[in-house]
Image (cartoon, rainbow, N blue to C red):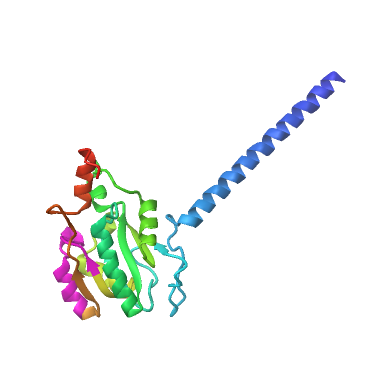
Amino acid sequence: AVRTQIGDWGQLHGLFRLLWLVAAVVAGAVAYLATHFIFGLRLHHLREVEAGNSYNSKIMTVLFRDFSGPRISPRGSVVCIGAFDGLHLGHRHLLAEARRFADAGNLDLVVVSFEPLPREFFGKANPPPRLIRARQKFRALRDAGADAVGLLRFNQALADTSAEDFIEELLVQRLNARHVLVGPDFFFGKGRRGDLGMLQELGAAHGFEARGVQPQVRQGERISSSLIRADLQAGRLQ
């Protein structure tokens, strides 16, 4: 009888252990799915648009990761492009200008950046430290008024994309750009062939206007992520 009782307790213990493991697996799966649903950093499209209808309900900021795909903004967009590492005063000035154009033209504000950043992709052995991570960047751009944020996967295929294809496939076909705003010293496309001049030239043919936004200056120096990074490394916290 004692052995039978011990055996019963052993079976119950095994059953409880199995139930605990199942509960832990289910809880982990739920947490994983919830995280990826909320932040969408691994989703190709957080919210795709039905043909002819704009997603811009001012309730949700759309996140997209792919260079090509369905049109993001059927009604047209104002596009900002850059690394946006740290979202400093220069970035905020650029975004404010873009928001002004978007509101005036009843257009969507789309911010395009890259994950990983190009300098991280090309400098894998010794990448410079980042000021903010991808999830923080998405939240900051959302809070700055972006209707859609592109954190494009910067891989070899994107690095090999010509500047002309970048304009045609991303700005024209995917984003339906009407205005494109970039910061100083902006280059894009394979071999960094694309610049503001090319954007203005091809924009005239594709129906969008491109302009550069003047940098913000502090104590005679242009505010940039590199300057902030150097200040942090030197302990100059202001």
**Which residue is painted at 17% across and 74% down in the image?**
200
**Which residue is painted at 19% across and 54% down in the image?**
223
Q: Answer whether residue 59 is magenta in the image.
A: no
Residue 2 visible? The answer is yes
Q: Position of residue 146 (x, y in %)?
A: 36, 65
**Which residue is painted at 37% across and 79% down in the image?**
75
- In this rendering, is residue 211 above or below 88? below
Viewer-closest of 164 and 209: 209
Furthest-left residue in this view: 220
Count of marks, rendered view? 0
Please state, as top left, top right, bottom left or bottom right, where the C terminus lies in the image.
top left
Please state, as top left, top right, bottom left or bottom right, where the N terminus lies in the image.
top right
Furthest-top residue in this view: 2
**Which residue is painted at 43% across and 55% down in the image?**
42
Relative placement, left or right, of 23 versus 205 is right
Q: Position of residue 36 (x, y in %)?
A: 48, 53
The image quarter containing residue 53 is: bottom left
- In this rendering, is residue 93 above or below 27? below
Viewer-closest of 81 and 24: 81
Q: Position of residue 45 (x, y in %)?
A: 44, 63
Q: Answer whether residue 193 is magenta in the image.
A: yes
Find the magenta span and give its range. 181-204
Residue 81 visible? The answer is no
Viewer-closest of 105 and 166: 105
The image quarter containing residue 74 is: bottom left
Viewer-closest of 52 and 11: 52
Q: Position of residue 130 (x, y in %)?
A: 28, 46
The image quarter containing residue 14 is: top right
